[in-house]
Image: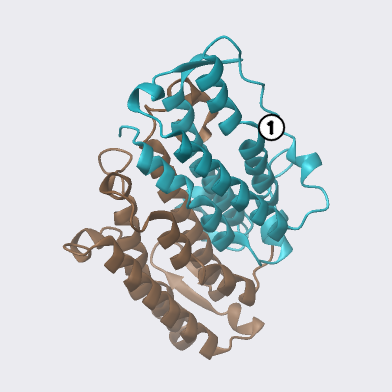
Chain colours: A cyan, B brown
């Protein structure tokens, strides 16, 4: 499917509500459970998404628009949330994510990007040349990837309790 | 994590809203796109969940409570939605799923199951002896499995548009 600005924004603006509906108010086991050592809980994932809103998507898009390929993106800190989420409730994090997302989507809408703008290129520190369209499509796919992760981590909390049904549930076999 | 009745119900009752928030009102490409031949679109998955509400979870639980292991479950038709969803809009299906789920959760609450009831056994046509607890835990994990699937299928619609970021998005590499 081709990238379309209005469709991407429609998916991006739903994510905060999807995540709140999925996890807000559930007991701690569902929020803090992970897939084992060095894997993330739903709580960790929300913190990661917040860090992306603050430091990745919009700053990188702005860098493309203002500097093109001349200045590479800042590397993304995949572990920032272990510091930044400390002491915050899940409800706090969800509200923070929702507010940042709303503000970031307003920024993108205010840019009023043309198709030609989406072809403009920036430089990723590892991946090299990337277009603004690729960055924005990745923002969408990244949201969905982490919705996948949260639902998968939750399902795995019942990995033992489903008994012989394990083999029919593909989510438990990854 | 151990199965707890109130926690399972809390997750189950969220699923209709999670799915509506994720897909209702999106353009057709997001609803009807799949992962290739013989894979399901979000639209197909909602139909599958409806068929489960009608024919699997509650009828099987009732069979355990009323007949124990003496009468095996009816086999589940994994392709019923290709007939049953025909001609229905996604909005129609989402409303149908929400109504069935609400009614089914009321049924379970009315049963007022004790821990000992959860140990009661039924007979799965392929898996053999299963407990009511395992059936109900599977209901929860099955919801989450299909949330995983829908978000993954949606992400894959941008599989080309993300360009070199493909390798960082684990959802695109399954």
The quadrant where residue B1 appears = bottom right
The residue lying furthest to the right in this view is: A87
Q: State the count of labels.
A: 1
The quadrant where residue A36 appears = top right
Tell me where residue B169 appears, x and y as whole percent: 52, 31
Which chain does the residue under circle 1 lie in? A
Q: Residue at x 38, y 66 (%)?
A: B125
Q: Which residue is drawn at 33% across and 39% down?
A: B35
The C terminus of chain A: image quadrant: top right
- Residue A95 appears left or right of A139: right
- Asked if residue B75 shows in the view, the reply is no
Disc 1 crowd rating (10 Å Cα; few below 14, some 14-19, many 20+) is few
Assign a secondary structure to mark 1: loop
Residue A87 position (above or below residue A24): above
Tell me where residue A167 appears, x and y as whole percent: 49, 52
Q: Nearer the viewer, residue A76 or B148?
A: A76
- Asked if residue B131 shows in the view, the reply is yes
The N terminus of chain A: image quadrant: top left
Residue B169 position (above or below residue B135): above
Mark 1, residue position = A78
Tell me where residue B94 appears, x and y as whole percent: 34, 66
Q: Which residue is drawn at 66% across and 37% down?
A: A54
The residue lying furthest to the left in this view is: B87
Q: Nearer the viewer, residue B154 or A155?
A: B154
Residue A38 position (above or below residue A101): above
Residue A48 position (above or below residue B134): above
- Residue B125 appears left or right of B139: left
Tell me where residue A153 appears, x and y as whole percent: 61, 50
Q: Residue at x 41, y 34 (%)?
A: A112
């Amino acid at each position: 499917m081709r990238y379309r600005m209005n469709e991407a924004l429609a998916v991006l603006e739903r994510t905060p509500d999807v995540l709140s509906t999925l996890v807000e108010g559930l007991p701690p086991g569902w929020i803090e459970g992970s897939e084992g050592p060095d894997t993330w809980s739903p709580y960790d994932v929300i913190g990661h998404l917040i860090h992306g809103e603050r430091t990745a998507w919009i700053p990188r898009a702005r860098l493309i628009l203002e500097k093109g390929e001349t200045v590479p993106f800042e590397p993304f800190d995949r572990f920032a949330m272990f510091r930044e989420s400390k002491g915050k409730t899940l409800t706090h994090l969800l509200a923070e994510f929702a507010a940042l997302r709303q503000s970031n989507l307003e920024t993108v809408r205010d840019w009023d990007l043309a198709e030609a703008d989406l072809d403009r290129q920036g430089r990723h520190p590892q991946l090299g040349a990337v277009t603004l369209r690729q960055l924005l499509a990745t923002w969408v796919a990244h949201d969905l990837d982490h919705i996948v992760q949260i639902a998968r981590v939750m399902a795995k909390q019942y990995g033992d309790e489903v008994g012989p049904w394990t083999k029919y549930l593909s989510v438990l076999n990854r």
